[in-house]
Image (cartoon, rainbow, N blue to C red):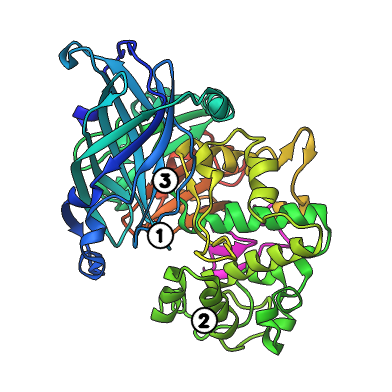
Amino acid sequence: MAAFTPPSPATTPGQVFSGTLRLRGVELANGFRAVHDPWDRSGEIGEPLRHLPAFEFEFVQRGSDVIPLLTGVQRSTHPYWEILLLPGTAWQSADDDGWTRVSLPFALQERAANCTHNGVMSWLFRGDAVSRVAYQVVSETCGYFKADLWGVVDAEFVPGDLADKAAAVIARVDAHRASRLPIRSLERLAEDYPAIDAAKLGVADGIPAEDISALGLVVDGIHYRSDCPTRQGPHPFCSSLALTSYSTAKSVFAAVATMRLERLYPGVSGRSIASLVNECDQPKWRDVTIENALDMATGNFESAGFEVDEDSAPHEAFVFADRHADKIEFACNHFPRKADPGTTFVYHTSDTYLVGAALQRFLDQHGGGDIYDSVLLEPIWHALNLSPQLDVVKRTYDDAAQPFTGYGLTYEADDIVRIANWLAYDGGMLDGEPALDTAMLAASLQRLPAVSGLRAGSDDLYYNNGFWAYNAGPSLECTEPVWVPFMSGVSGITIAMFPNGVIYYYFSDSYVFRWQTGREAAHAVRPLCPPGNR
């Protein structure tokens, strides 16, 4: 990774890169090494897994910034990979004989699922000439497929004046960077709060250091963050590293969209699934509301054992299906009625998919609009100046283009901590007005004791409106409960929002979901046990 890392400070580039970069023969560059592949992705997918998807994208340069004009994960014809491009850097080096060098971060993401593999590419240019492009992918947030990919490919550069086309993109990049929380290192965290052993965060909970993509703590508006380790050294663009949402989207997408529409159309969360989703128009869905499905309490399941249904082979097939017809058929028909709606927690990503489908049908009946773009992206994410990575959500590969709802977002670390802060401590306010239904948000964050949600596997773990909550009191030796709402994602992702204003998060592919070190760190900043509760 050192070869792709810009010097500090970088020398001002002597030339400007503006136009289309096309890679030729990507299928011939197939450096590949499986690091962890228990599902035999390399055998199942074969040769295409080893190379990039087709690559032809427009870029502009502003100063040292090299900015792609397409934002978010880009759909492709590749059988496995989609691609996401992020702003990079250009600089001049005496060793490059008058050529200007570019280093650009990018990520590969599964076509139908959410594993995200981070890489960097680099090339030289002078006038309308361009060198070959070198790339490598050496880290990921993906518990079931870890691999290195690398290669050098021929390239073609077609110069073009893209200033007018790029103006809005550059403005968004600038607004986002200006809105990011100030960053300090974890080493600085230990200096500012000597009671915290920053070196133990995550790893003392059993998360191998090599499995952590990013980890951090937010205290009083300061983002204390790890570097972004890879198998070949720190990632040179840690601030913009692409982080997969997995099931944190159940909170960030499904729950926030429901609360937004409940604010705009009171009562929508009480609409039945069957009344909106024609494919589910059958008795077992006629008494199940959108909020029941958001709560994982539809009453339709095979096993009430923790994660038994979710981990079953048929449900995994649902997750990896990329056609709406297949997903909706499974979600509506697979699970039998076993309990009254609202009484039993059984975790199903397919139920969250139904939340998205029902909300989209509701919008279709009330003036149209897309459930992601018009309900979240434009009115909220843009207002918060979140990163362009959130411009796109994963969708089915068909005319329906139905968002996955329960997974399929991509963040940078600043995005998720500012979303958590906006929900937990700013009350979901925009321009002085609530953007979300305040009662639903309060219940989701355990602010309404009478509406705590359902027991989700233990007496200290609850689930409500797409958010988890953990009673941290016993682990901190408090004499009374201390409920901490948090978001969680498969592979090993946690974003915890403590009642003292501290946010702790990690993105890993360890399948470890323990965060005692985060609780202890938050407690060291400001006691979590209320006075008289220690």
Which kind of residue does numbered mark 1 sit on?
A: Arg
Q: Earlier in the sequence, mark 1 or mark 3?
A: 1
Residue 52: horizontal and vertical position, in percent? 29, 49
* Numbered label attached to residue 304: 2
Q: Which residue is mark 1?
A: 111
Q: Are marks 1 and 3 in contact (CB under 8 Å)?
A: no
Residue 189 location, quadrant: top left
Assign a secondary structure to mark 3: strand
Asked whether 98 or 237 is in front, the reply is 98
Q: Is residue 167 left or right of residue 243?
A: right
Q: Earlier in the sequence, mark 2 or mark 1?
A: 1
Per the image, label 2 sits on a secondary structure element best described as loop
Q: Is residue 449 magenta?
A: yes
Using a 10 Å C-alpha cutoff, classify the residue at mark 3 as few (fewer than 14 neighbours), some (14 to 19) or many (20 or more): many
- On screen, residue 258 above or below 38: above
Looking at the rendered structure, the secondary structure element under dot 1 is loop
As rendered, which of 103 and 281 lies closer to the eye? 103
Q: Which residues are magenta?
A: 444-473
Q: Residue at x 53, y 36 (%)?
A: 387
Q: Is tag 2's residue or tag 3's residue first in the polypeptide sequence?
A: 3
Quadrant for the N terminus in the image: top left
**Residue highlighted by disc 3:** 243
Was residue 262 drawn as part of the magenta stretch in this picture?
no
